[in-house]
Amino acid sequence: MWDYFERGGKRAIGIWHRRAGKDDVCLHLAAVKAFERPATYWHMLPEYSQGRKAIWAAINPHTGKRRIDEAFPPAVRDNTNEQEMFIRFKNGSTWQVVGSDRFNSTVGSPPAGLVLSEWALSNPAAWAYLSPILNENGGWAAFITTPRGKNHAHSTLQMARQSPDWFSEVLDVRKTGAISLEAVEEQRREYHGIYGAEAGDALIEQEYFCSFESAILGAYYGRELARLHADGRVGKVDADDAFPIHAAWDLGYSDDTSIWFYQVVSGEIRVIDFHSSNGHTVDWYADLVKSKTGGNVGTLWLPHDAKAKTLAGNGRSIEQQLAAHFGRQKIRIVPRLSLQDGIQAVRLTLPQCWFNEETTMQGLSALAQYQREWDDERKCFRDRPRHDWTSHPADAFRMLAIAWRAEPPPKPRNPPPRWETDLTINELIAANRRKRLRDD
């Protein structure tokens, strides 16, 4: 990877095992690039709060020095802002630790170099937002991670392997020799004691042997999503113009608003699109729905907080604001269920779903990584989900899982004509009666 970037490469993904030195390589790479081209550089973690512990304050156990001090010696710095995890170099370049959970709120000039650390755990919307910027300014990006199931990191790797413009590499402990197999087996025994044998083995395969097949520890829907992929129900799914397109929402303003678009056809749920963003008005989302559905709007299913009146809506609730765009009959509130009942509804719903891979991968990644909180003190999982970028997409799909059964059986808008020879005797008599009435 280093040689690739030295030759002027722009895009690389490294699937490297735990403790292989991913972040160290990229910190030193950023130092070199910052003095080749004065610009802004970011090191992005899944969550901003992780940055201080994982990068800014991290100590190299082999040297006893902070990793950022090894990569960016004080002699090359102009100033250092400990609070904002920000460094300005003497040549004018800057480097900063940021989070994919707040990528669009970072103040300052956009980056010309970007490291996406733990990409498999990051919000893929961050790259969707930043890639046009790097394309425009000729910047580079390095994606480094260990696997977390077949999510967006797996898709990135598959794409990179097919592209002549990308570098890709998978390195497990057998290839690097950075950690002895004896040390890995010692870690396996420790994981067995904490998580149990099955989960411990899955974690070892994932962390040290770079397996995309292993289950994500604590994931709510791991088994259902594995079956979904195995059955080939993630692929190309087109909308059927004869059936309305429904939308299941989870609402936020400063946080993400997530929407799943789907059709119910003969008992199948065809999930045809997904969207997640933040900071937009209700009018903006209404236009988005019209665009995504092509005007073939079914029911908009909203959570209970859509009933609350807001100052932003001039005293009107989100439910009322959307009704002004689509009509009151199109807006419905999802029946209230407990969180655990909603999660169970998702587990029962996923086996009936088909997903359009091209437009729903971000949402599928969120469902795959939606997991319970880990209690490090008690060494067990809590009974509540971890709140991160996956929460809103998962909550919106929970709305879908609860709501879709409440839809009346869909009727094609333009049913195909039937020949007289296809009719039953009773249907034929009724048709002739209607014809005589029309003639009269």
Image (cartoon, helix red, strand yellow):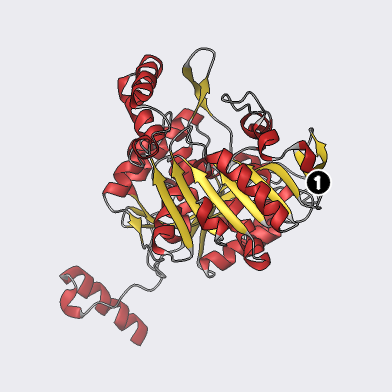
Q: Is residue 440 something that shows in the picture?
A: no
Q: Is residue 139 something that shows in the picture?
A: yes
Give the left or right position of residue 322, taking residue 403 as reference.
right
Q: Residue furthest right?
A: 78
- Residue underneath mark 1: 311
Whether 266 is drawn above or below 212: the answer is: below
Instruction: Tally the marks.
Output: 1
Q: Residue at x 56, y 25 (%)?
A: 62
- Residue 23 place in picture, x, y as percent: 57, 39
Residue type, mark 1 in image: Leu
Q: Residue at x 15, y 78 (%)?
A: 421
Q: Quadrant of residue 236?
A: bottom left
- Residue 371 place in picture, x, y as percent: 48, 32
- Residue 428 place in picture, x, y as percent: 21, 75
Whether 179 is drawn above or below 292: the answer is: above
Q: Nearer the viewer, residue 10 or 145?
A: 10
Q: Residue at x 31, y 75 (%)?
A: 416
Image quadrant containing the C terminus: bottom left
Whether 5 is drawn above or below 148: the answer is: below
Task: Mark 1: give few (<14), some (14-19) or many (20+) Cα within 10 Å.
Answer: few
Q: Nearer the viewer, residue 409 or 216?
A: 216
Q: Residue at x 67, y 35 (%)?
A: 70
Q: Quadrant of residue 329?
A: bottom right
- Secondary structure of the residue carrying numbered label 1: loop
- Residue 104 place in picture, x, y as percent: 70, 51
